[in-house]
Image (cartoon, rainbow, N blue to C red):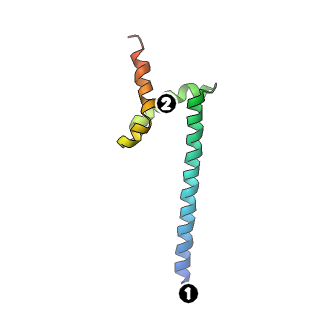
Amino acid sequence: MARRSIEQRLEQIKAWLGKQDRARDTRRKILLDALILHRLETRADTALAGTLPEWLRTELPGFLTRAEDKALFRDLLEASGASEANTPD
């Protein structure tokens, strides 16, 4: 059984640490997304709940670049157009 050099072991450890960092980052994003979606769905009585949908409608179109991603948020983005259509001129 061939032994790995110290350099090989260090590279293996660095790769493992990088994977752990990416997993932690993904977990943070999932939890933050879950909180935002919960606030949007429950319309919780907070100052943020009133401005969050409006902010997302403003920011998402410029942030999302892929059609598949935009389709995921179609309900939120189209809600903006529906409310604007009902606004008197």
Q: Residue furthest right?
A: 45
Count of residue discs: 2
The quarter of the displayed image where residue 77 is located: top left
Where is residue 4? Give x, y as percent: 54, 84
Q: Residue furthest top?
A: 88
In the image, is residue 43 above or below residue 5? above
- First reached walking from the N terminus: tag 2 or tag 1: 1
Where is residue 14? Give x, y as percent: 54, 69
In the image, is residue 86 above or below residue 56? above
In the image, is residue 69 above or below residue 89? below
Residue under label 2, please give it.
55
Image depth: mark 2 or mark 1 in front: 1
Look at 62% across and 27% down and name the residue there.
44
* Mark 2 vs mark 1, CA separation in Å: 56 Å
Look at 59% across and 34% down and name the residue there.
38
Disc 2 residue type (three-letter): Trp
Residue under label 1, please give it.
3
Where is residue 78? Give x, y as percent: 41, 27
Query: Which quarter of the rendering shows the C terminus?
Result: top left
Look at 52% across and 68% down and name the residue there.
15
SS label for mark 2: helix
